[in-house]
Amino acid sequence: MFQQFFAIVRNTFLESIRQPIYLVMLGIGLIALLITPGLSTFTLSDDNLFMVDMGLATIFLCGLIIAAFVATSVVTREIENKTVLALVSKPVGRPVFVLGKYVGVASAIVVAAIIMSCTFLLIKRYGVMQTARDSADMPVIVFGLIALCGSLLIGIWCNFFYGWVFTSTAVGAMLPLSILAWIGVLMFDKEWKFQMFEPMETPFGTMRMISGSFDPQIVLALAGVFLALLVIASVALAASTRLGQVMTVVVCLVVFMAGLLTDTLFGRRAFESKSRGRILAINVIDDHNDNFSDDGDTYHITVDRGIDITDDEPVYLSSDNLGFGLLGPGQAVLKSVSYNTADLVKRGDDPMERPPRIDDYLIDGPQRVHSLWRIAWSVPPNLQAMSFGDALNQGHFIPPTHLGLVGLYSLLYISGMLSLAVILFQTREVG
């Protein structure tokens, strides 16, 4: 069975990267990333933050189109051309066929995402040239051109002399060369000075970083994009077992939009909890244990809106505006309310998980769950949870544990979609 499985994976992977749409979208993605620094100069704020946002969105959108078209064609085309009969007529189980197809498609998507991600990391290192006096980052230009031109030349050479397929050969060469280009840029700074494992100042103190150009937060954001693309690929594969290529692509686009808007469309209705304001500033007035758990502990807060809460009216604290991150069963009241400032006073001895912080929310009570809206919220994949661009732009730290939770959610969703694909394909007439 394993031999059959790996044969399906290998053939699906090669078939995927040989499709014209694969190389076309990969080329469009690389060109879009290359012009991102120029387009980012038209902002009125931090150009580099906008460039990062545009780069992540470019990888996401191009990867989405690759996932939708490649994942649909590898199953739909085989069913329409009756070539799937050669497999299912042999002792190859349909679940093995579906799983092998997905792993092959996912491998092709990951290869394209890695190539675009390495290009994006080179562009991020290059940055936006704010003035004409800024000097070019020559290591980025040199290593980037070597990777790009080298892969194209290898593809042309092997196609001309050995008859190899240009698309798969060029992509196969571009993957290691793009990774090596990124490693080369990590090794040298803008002035060609070696910079590996040198002491650097970080928010956590002086540490030996792998490189002055290495940003682990960007890597975590790219990993979130990878997970989103793998989820979309599983949706496309499940839809392609019953639908044609055009309708499957439409389903992928609908799921993509619903996944980005599921919190707005369904989440805020599924979990009802009225927000009374977001904390913008906070000062400790009286808290001997620094835990906001003792009766009478007092903090002076400033929120982002006019406070419509009267004195001594109870409120709850949460790390989000829907009440998911309720800090504990403990209540507090507001004193000395003056437009958007007040004293937050703890009432009772119920413990709190931690003291209130900036960006916490005042809410009117524990969330109330509406079952039907919650089901509607749970069906589309929550792609917004896999997009960390907003966190990067706002300077928030992305904990690796959060990526682990998102990865677990993605694994469960992919498993569910592949199970659905097997169920749909089991009863599909392919003769």
Image (cartoon, rainbow, N blue to C red):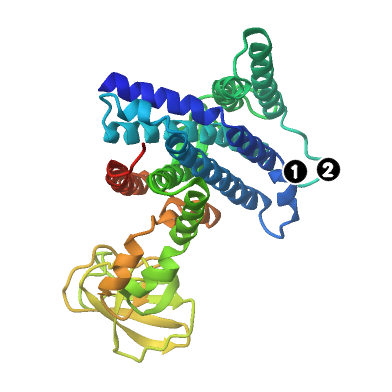
166 and 321: which one is in front?
166
Residue 48 locus on image (x, y percent): 65, 48
Q: Badge 1 local density, few (<14 within 10 Å), some, or many (20+)?
A: some
Q: Badge 2 local density, few (<14 within 10 Å), some, or many (20+)?
A: few
Q: Quadrant of residue 298?
A: bottom left
Residue found 48% across the figure and 85% down from its top: 306
Kind of element beneath mark 1:
loop
Residue 104 locus on image (x, y percent): 42, 30
Q: Which residue, given by chain and number where applicable, does mark 2 sit on? A: 132
Q: Is residue 282 visible?
A: yes
Side (left or right) of 351 relative to 175: left
Q: Which residue, given by chain and number where applicable, does mark 1 sit on? A: 129
Question: Residue 415 got which mark?
Answer: none
Q: How many marks?
A: 2
220 and 158: which one is in front?
158
> Label 1 near label 2: C-beta < 8 Å?
yes
The C terminus lies in quadrant: top left
* Residue type, mark 2 in image: Ala
Residue found 44% across the figure and 58% down from its top: 259
The N terminus lies in quadrant: top left
